[in-house]
Each structure stands twice: as C-alpha cells, then as structure tokens.
Amino acid sequence: MKRLFTTLLSVVGLSRPDARGQDIQTIDPSKILYTVPTISNDLSPVEKVDLPLPDSAFTLHEDDWCQVEFFTAERLPELQRMLKEYKTFESKNRTSSGWKNVYVRRIERLPVFTGEASPQRLGLLLKSTVGDAPILHATASLTGRVSNGFSMSLDGNIWLYGYTSDGGISVLAASVGEHPDDQVLTSVFATLHREAGLVLVDWKQQLLLVGVDGGGQIEVWQP
C-alpha cells in the first residue's frame, strides 16, 4: 500500500511522510481523493537502478502497473466477475475530481505465455525486439527495475512488458502512451488470441477483448 500513501501525500501537497521542518498538518479523510479508480495489489520484485537512466529506458508509474493486461481465455469468467464488481464499486466512489476509494485487484499470477525463452518467442511472433525490463517509479522516486522483466516497443506509442517465472511469462501487459495508434494494440491482441488463446482486459475502461469473429472484427465484452 506504499504507493497509495504516496499518492495521498501528493494530493494534499506533501512529498514525503517524514519531511522535516514542516509544521504538523491535519487532513480531513473525507476530502482525500484517489487519482486512479483501480490498482493491482501486486508488484514484481525489483532490482536497484543505476543513474542516469538511458534515453531508451521504459519507465512506468507503479499505479499504471497492469492496467491493460493479457490473460488466458480460461480465466474469462473470473475477469468478467471482477469487472462487474469493479464497475459497481467505481460508480459508487466516483466524484467530479477523483475517487473516494480505490478498487484493489487481487489476481493470482499464472503463466500467460508458456515455454522456454518465452519473451524471445513472443518477440518473434510479434516481429518485435525484446528490450530491457521496465523501470517502476512512484510519485517522486524510482522504485527499481522489474526482476526477470522484459519490454517491447511497438509502433504507435505502444509498449508490451512483463516478467517471467519458471512456467513462462507470468505478467504480460500493455502500456498505451499519448496519441496512441489503437490499431496496433488490437492487431497484437488478434495475433495473441489466435496463436495463444489470450484475452485482453482494460481495467480503467472496463472492457474485455475476448475474440475475433469470422470477419476479422474484435469481439468486446463490457459489464
């Protein structure tokens, strides 16, 4: 929950919980709002990062971890149940400038893309080069580089990233930058659905890409 606390401090104008030289301030808890409606409860282990970061480094805020991610189709009922629950939660906690509470997603991490050298196989499938692990950061500090992680820079300001475990890729997610080419991500989904039976969930947008019909159109499910 450290990242949540950091977010709270930034909302009220503080950067550190142990800031010295400041007068003690009081905060009305009812006025504290979250800047995102949902976060994942898990972050991968991280390693120390040497500074300065190279220009090619892929960085990601902790709160953006796995906001758009792939799962095997066998987990579709679980994802649909969570999205229904999340939709009700989000609407109850939404305000004009933020959220009163945040929905914490608790998901068991199971292999998404299996086999030896999984990132390299994924890169060949998508005709993309496997890059370094993503670097996570909080509001005002670096968290570290994802252990056993990888990233792939795609066209259209889209990145894929994740990390591996003994069974293959345990997390496979997407990061969508500014002014993205949405067709790139839908094309990636179509390929991974066809070749590996994966579905794609966008938690913030509350939607699932579940398949591709005979005419090549993406099949979407929403709660």
Image (cartoon, grey):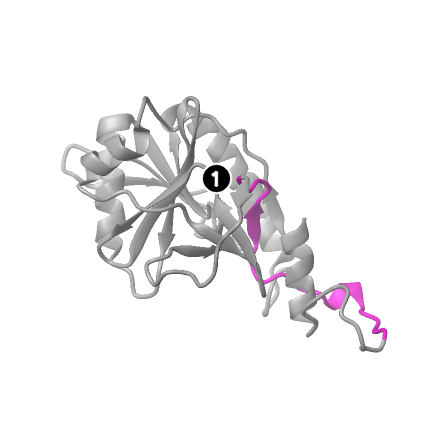
- Which residue corresponds to the image point at 49% horizontal and 53% vertical from the top-left? 49
Of residue 191 and residue 17, the one placed in the foreground of this image is 17
Q: Is residue 152 above or below residue 148?
A: below
State left or right for residue 211 relative to residue 141: left
Q: Which residues are magenta?
A: 24-44
State left or right for residue 161 relative to residue 124: right
Q: Is residue 223 above or below residue 17?
A: above
Callout 1, which amino acid?
Answer: Ser
State left or right for residue 151 relative to residue 23: left
Secondary structure of the residue carrying tag 1 is loop
- Mark 1 sits on what residue? 147
Question: In this view of the protein, can residue 214 be seen by the observer?
Answer: yes
Residue 153 percent coordinates (x, y)? 28, 51
State left or right for residue 42 relative to residue 23: left
- Which residue corresponds to the image point at 58% horizontal and 65% vertical from the top-left? 140
Residue 26: say if magenta: yes
Residue 201 percent coordinates (x, y)? 41, 41
Residue 72 percent coordinates (x, y)? 38, 27
